Image (cartoon, rainbow, N blue to C red):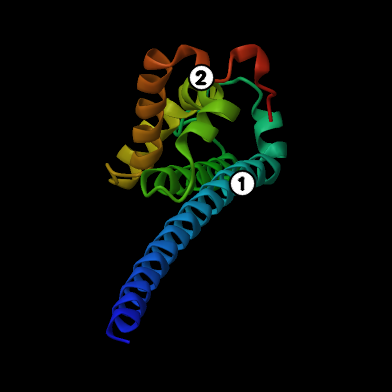
Amino acid sequence: MQIIQNYLSVIESLSVIVGVVFIALQLKLQSRISRADHDRQKKQSTIEFYNYISSENRIFLSALADKPLTYESSSSQEKIDANKYLGLLERLAVGVATKIYDFEILCLISGRYLSEKKYGQFKNYIDGSRKANQAPQQFIEFERLVGKINNYMIENPARIASKSAIVDI
C-alpha cells in the first residue's frame, strides 16, 4: 500500500510538472501569436495612415506639383494647406518615433518620396515658418524622420522604395 502511495505521489508530482510546463508553453505561444498580430496591425496602420495623408492632400499636392514652396511667397491658402499636410506628416513621424507606426513599412512604401521629394520641396517653407512663428521645434519630428530615412537608405539600399516605384500623390 505504501508503494502505491509513493507511486501515486510521484505520478501526481509529474502531472503537476507536466501541467506547469504545458501552461508555460501555451503562454509563450500565445505571447508570440499576440506579438505577431500586433506587428501586423502596426504595419497595416502605417499603410492606412499614409494613404489617409495622401488622399487628404491630393488636390494641394497636385496643384503644387514639384514646385518648391517658401513660407514668404505662399498665399494664405497655401500656408493653410501646407500646415495641414506637414502637420499630418508630423503626426506620422511622431507615430514612427513612438513605434505606433512601422518605420520599415514606411520606408518601403515612400522612403525616397518623403526624404528626397517632399522634404526637399518643403524645407524652405519649414525654415520660413519656424522663423516667422518663432517656433524652432515646428515640424522637428518630420525632419528627424527624414534623417532617419536617409540613414536607413544608406545602410539598406535594397530595402527602400526606389524612385521608379513611387507614385506621386
Residue 104 rendering spot, x and y as whole percentages: 48, 32
Q: What x and y, as percent, mark residue 102?
A: 48, 41
Q: Is residue 122 left or right of residue 60?
A: left
- Identified at 47% across, 24% down, the residue is 115
How many other residues sit within 10 Å of disc 1, few (<14), some (14-19) or many (≥20)? Answer: some
Q: Looking at this view, is 152 or 138 the one in front?
A: 152
In the displayed structure, 57 sits above or below 158; it is below
| SS at badge 2 | helix
Q: What residue is disc 2 on?
A: 159
**Mark 2–mark 1 CB contact (< 8 Å):** no
Q: State which tag comes first along the sequence, 2 or 1.
A: 1
In 3D space, how far apart are the residues under numbered discs 2 and 1 (Cα atoms)?
18 Å
Residue at the image position 47 percent from the left and 26 percent from the top = 119
24 relative to 103, above or below: below
The answer to whether residue 153 is above or below residue 26 is above
Q: Is residue 108 above or below residue 54?
A: above
Label 1: state its secondary structure: helix
Q: Amino acid at mark 2?
A: Arg
Under mark 1, the amino acid is Gln
Q: Quadrant of the N terminus?
A: bottom left
Q: Nearer the viewer, residue 29 or 166?
A: 29
| Residue 142: percent from left, percent from top | 41, 38
Task: Identify the residue at image location x=34%, y=34%.
Answer: 144
Counting labels gives: 2
Q: What is the quadrant of residue 53 in the picture?
A: top right
Mark 2: few, some, or many residues within 10 Å (few <14, many ≥20)? some
Quarter of the picture holding the C terminus: top right
Q: Which residue is mark 1?
A: 44
Task: Name the residue furthest front.
Answer: 1
Is residue 102 found left or right of 54 in the rendered image? left
Q: Nearer the viewer, residue 96 or 53?
A: 96
- The picture places residue 16, in percent across and down from the top left corner, at 36, 73
